Image (tube, helix red, strand yellow):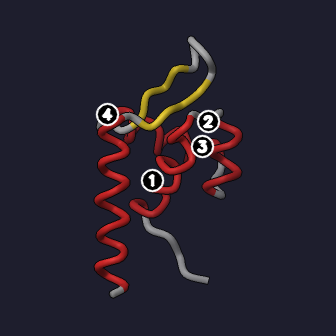
């Protein structure tokens, strides 16, 4: 099994959160624990790639900037594979 790097995990979190997701969904979908999720969410939120709306509706969503990052990431992965 191939190990994932930080960028792979962050891209997976952004992908799952595109339509809004709770922390539990992100943990299971990205196959990480809650402690790691918290660290990644802090990084992603600090970079403006996600919006944490826990107070409002309990969902974490990928921002427009996050969606752009995800597109660049996917294009880079395709370029690398091709």
Which of discs 3 and 1 lies nearer the camera? The answer is: 1
Q: Badge 1: few (under 14), some or many (20 or more) residues near its Cα, within 10 Å?
A: some
Instruction: Look at 31% across and 33% down and name the residue there.
Output: 48
Q: Would you say 22 lies left or right of 69 here? A: right
* Front tag of 3 and 4: 4
Q: Closer to the N terminus: mark 2 or mark 3?
A: 2
> Residue at label 3?
35
State the residue position of label 4: 48
Distance from label 3 to label 1 (Cα)? 14 Å
Give x and y (percent) for residue 74: 37, 65
- Quarter of the rendering containing residue 42: top left
**Labelled disc at residue 45:** none
Relative vertical location of residue 43 with respect to residue 70 in this rendering, above or below:
above
Badge 4 marks a residue whose secondary structure is loop
The spot of residue 36 in percent (x, y) is 55, 48
Counting residues from the start of the chain, the first of labels 2 and 1 encountered is 1
Residue at (49%, 58%) from the top-left corner?
A: 9
């Amino acid at each position: 099994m191939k190990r994932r790097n930080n960028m792979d995990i962050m891209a997976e979190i952004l992908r799952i959160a595109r339509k809004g997701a709770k922390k539990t969904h992100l943990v299971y979908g990205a196959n990480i624990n809650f402690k790691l999720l918290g660290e990644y969410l802090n990084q992603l939120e600090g970079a403006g790639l996600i919006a944490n709306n826990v107070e409002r509706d309990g969902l974490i969503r990928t921002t427009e900037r996050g969606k752009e990052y995800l597109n660049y990431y996917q294009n880079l992965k395709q370029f690398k594979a091709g």
